């Protein structure tokens, strides 16, 4: 049986359009300090104070394009490029991007030992507080030194936020079309804006240091920004 050229062309177009990325978007998570890219382990400065972040782990939840959640939860390790790149399905244009910073209340009740090791909520990521039976949302460790040099008499830094009351969300009204590349930028300088590097370097979201965790959590929405490329 012979098919006419006119009957073949629509089929060829249909198959060629499949798998070309037209029904998805890519999401890249970038880390900057005051707008300048940096890597974990690099020495930064706030005034005369030197800062060295040695670990930056965090969760993003309920990542949505328009009204539809595309990723329930992702675990970001700033030293693992694979954990900072995602592909999200999208079949039509939307005008909003939204997400949560931390683990939403339903997932925060989960048992980390019930997940495979490659799951974001797995105990393999060492983000679960057994004493609180819930997850850390942000786990940021490092050192600071008021002399401007890291290495001698450093002050330890540990910002570990969690608990449902510290979950924050953000919505960005922006046109997103299938095939777009999204860049979600986390400016860590925005996280510690207004935070004393002399007296507010330690929090585990417990009673005596909870105010620091609140301050950091309240800074998060402004610290994240989205662009479409």
Image: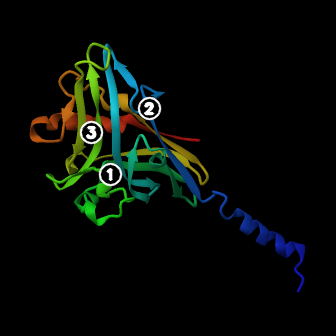
Quick check: 157 above or below 107? above
Residue under pointer 1 = 125
- The image shows residue 112 at horizontal and vertical percentages of 27, 60
- Nearest the viewer among 223 and 36 is 36
- Residue at image point 43% right, 55% down: 64
Image location (x, y in percent) of residue 153 = 22, 19
Q: Is residue 146 above or below residue 129?
A: above
Q: Mark 2 points at which residue?
A: 39
Whether residues under marks 2 and 1 lie with C-beta atoms below 8 angstroms apart, the answer is no
Classify mark 2: helix, strand or loop: loop
Tell me, yes or no, if residue 93 can be seen here.
Answer: no
Q: What residue is drawn where x is 28% and y is 41%?
A: 139
Q: Distance between the residues labelled 3 and 1?
A: 21 Å
Q: Quadrant of the C terminus?
A: top right
Q: In which quarter of the image is the N terminus?
A: bottom right
Which badge, 3 or 2, comes first in the chain's sequence? Answer: 2
Measure the C-alpha gap from mark 3 to mark 2.
22 Å
Whether tag 3 and tag 2 are in contact, CB under 8 A, the answer is: no
| Mark nearer the viewer, 3 or 2 | 2
Residue at mark 3: 217
Q: What element carries label 1?
A: helix
Q: Compare marks 2 and 1 and give the one earlier in the sequence.
A: 2
Furthest residue in direction front, as rendered: 152
Query: Pointer 2: residues within 10 angstroms few (<14), some, or many (20+)?
Result: some
* Residue 200, picture quadrant: top left
Q: In this view, does 41 lie to the left or right of 109?
A: right
Q: Residues within 10 Å of mark 3 (few under 14, many from 20)?
A: many
For the point 35% across and 39% down, which residue is it?
A: 56
Residue 16: image quadrant is: bottom right
Q: Is label 3 or label 1 in front?
A: 1
Residue 185's spot in the image, x, y percent? 45, 37
Instruction: Return the x and y of residue 13 as percentages of the image width and height.
Output: 76, 66
């Amino acid at each position: 049986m012979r098919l006419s050229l006119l009957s073949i062309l629509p089929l060829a177009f249909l198959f060629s359009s499949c798998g070309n990325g037209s029904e998805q978007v890519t999401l890249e998570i970038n880390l900057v300090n005051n707008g300048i890219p940096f890597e974990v382990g690099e020495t930064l400065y706030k005034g005369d104070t030197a800062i060295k972040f040695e670990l930056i782990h965090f969760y993003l939840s309920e990542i949505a394009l328009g009204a539809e959640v595309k990723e329930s939860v992702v675990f970001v390790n700033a030293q693992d490029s694979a954990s900072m790149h995602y592909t999200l399905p999208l079949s039509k244009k939307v005008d909003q991007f939204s997400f949560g910073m931390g683990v939403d209340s339903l997932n925060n009740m989960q048992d980390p030992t019930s997940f495979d090791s490659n799951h974001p909520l797995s105990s393999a990521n060492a983000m679960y507080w057994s004493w609180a039976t819930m997850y850390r949302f942000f786990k940021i460790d490092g050192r600071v030194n008021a002399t401007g040099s890291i290495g001698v008499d450093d002050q330890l830094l540990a910002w570990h936020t969690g608990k449902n009351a510290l979950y924050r969300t953000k919505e960005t009204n922006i046109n997103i079309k299938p095939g777009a590349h999204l860049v979600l930028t986390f400016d860590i300088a925005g996280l510690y804006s207004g935070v004393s590097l002399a007296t507010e370097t330690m929090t585990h979201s417990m009673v005596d240091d909870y105010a620091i965790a609140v301050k950091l959590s309240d800074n998060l929405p402004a610290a994240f920004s989205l662009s479409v490329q």
